[in-house]
Amino acid sequence: MSKEGSTEAPIRHPINFEHPDFINPEKLDSEMRRVFDICHGCRRCFNLCDSFPKLFDMIDESKNEDVESLSSDQFTPVVDACTLCDMCFMTKCPYVPPHDFDLDFPHLMLRYRTAQKKLGKLPVIPRQLAEIDRNSKIGIMFSKIINWVSNIKNKLLRKILELVAGIDKRVQLPKYNTETFSNFFKRNKDLIKFETKTNSRKVVIYTTCFVNFNKKNTGVAALKVLKKNGVEVQEAYPGCCGMPFLEQADLPKVVQQAKKVSNDLVEWVNKGYKVITLTASCGLMLKFEWPLLLPDDSNIEKLSKNVMDIDEYVVDISKNEGLAEGLHEIDGGVTVHHACHARAQNMGIKARDMLKLIPNAKIDVVERCAGHGGTFGVMKDTHDLAIKVGRPTARQIKIKNNKYMASDCPLAGKHLKQLEIDTNIKNDEAVHPIELIAKSYRL
């Protein structure tokens, strides 16, 4: 018997992107119309992102005010406005599987983009930006020059970059490290020692591309906090998780990265190590997206069951063995931006739970999309829309009036901080929550 709304835990179907029906024009068009008609009748997601207002306005302004009055070429703006944040699936939609309506709006948008890619209709520059490992090796090698060129204060060169590559001149771009976190780890892993009791815990930090190439401090903080708590720590970075390729609907490339990275990481799992991720998007890929793309791959299945977010792992230590003594008060309150890809992992607000372990800490949480979405917030064509989606979130952060903003998504944090430049937050971007734990330990 069919039930109204999601009365059971949501499930997701494997993404069978190699099946000919996946990008069959007639079948895809029919499914788009079926889903859009259900969304039109519900409208629960009207305030999540711009995809839904665009869809509802188009239908309301159509000849008969229904989906059948829309031409197929009107679907593209709805798809373009989707950042694949998964929030409609995870938090709003009452018709996700196992409901009979069987809706998965984000993965339908991914399917449509895959068809666009096959027809050569996706822009070239975002696809090139998705080549993280290639680009970042160059970025690390010439970090001083590239950081200078890409600095938002370098108005002439940023204007040229906008004209040539379509990267909005107003966006504060990530800076490159002068060395990878992997190299830092090799040089310092045995030098970082603390007088603390050891335990049987063993982890390998999957550094993630952003920490490895752009934000080494997050990795350093995680290493120190874990060692402070007696955990044996190793490090691995076999390559990017493929999230940037997922956003560009390059599913064969995502599968290639998944196989490459999982082959390396599962060896650590086989030796009794937990895999710890330092960026929310990467945790989501390893836990959920990879198994949907490769449902029969035993390595990926085993890995997905042995991956934990760093916040999640520290909370687990606290609940089971208790954290090492030495946490001190920090000099101001913290607003936690609960990033979409952290929410989509369905593990609760672990960043908040972890930061509450700091004595007398004032912790507030903001649960709204930042609007960034990978290259979505960077490219000139979509930057204004990213601002529109993110501005209400930035206002909430400002109202909380805390000294620190923390987010498990470094790009979301950077975007939100830039939207409210007169906030009293001192740092120019969000810190990762683990950095505040390291600060509390005075590491």
Image: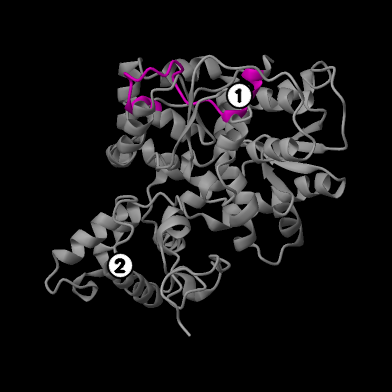
Residue that badge 1 annotates = 435
Q: Residues within 10 Å of mark 1 (few under 14, many from 20)?
A: many
- Depth order, front residue of 227/245: 227
* Number of the label disc, if any, that sits on residue 367: none
- Please check the rendered image and state whether residue 63 is part of the magenta-colored stretch, yes or no: no
**Residues at discs 1 and 2 in contact (Cβ within 8 Å):** no
* Tag 1 secondary structure: helix
Q: Amino acid at mark 2?
A: Cys
Q: Residue at x 57, y 22 (%)?
A: 360
Residue 277's place in the image compared with 152, above or below, is below
Query: Along the polypeptide, which appears first: circle 1 or circle 2?
Result: 2
- Depth order, front residue of 23/36: 36
Q: Amino acid at mark 1?
A: Glu
* Tag 2 secondary structure: helix
Give the magenta range: 417-440
- Depth order, front residue of 180/429: 429
Q: Position of residue 46 (x, y in %)?
A: 29, 56
Q: CA distance from mark 1 to mark 2?
A: 41 Å
* Number of the label disc, if any, that sits on residue 42: 2
- Which of the 4 quarters of the picture holds residue 440? top right
Q: Residue at x 19, y 59 (%)?
A: 57
Q: Position of residue 148 (x, y in %)?
A: 45, 15
Residue 91 relative to residue 194: left or right: left
Residue 359 relative to residue 400: left or right: right
Q: Position of residue 136 (x, y in %)?
A: 57, 30
Residue 345 visible (yes or no): yes
Residue 322's place in the image compared with 426, above or below, is below
Residue 125 visible (yes or no): no
**Residue that protrudes farthest toward the front in the picture:** 360
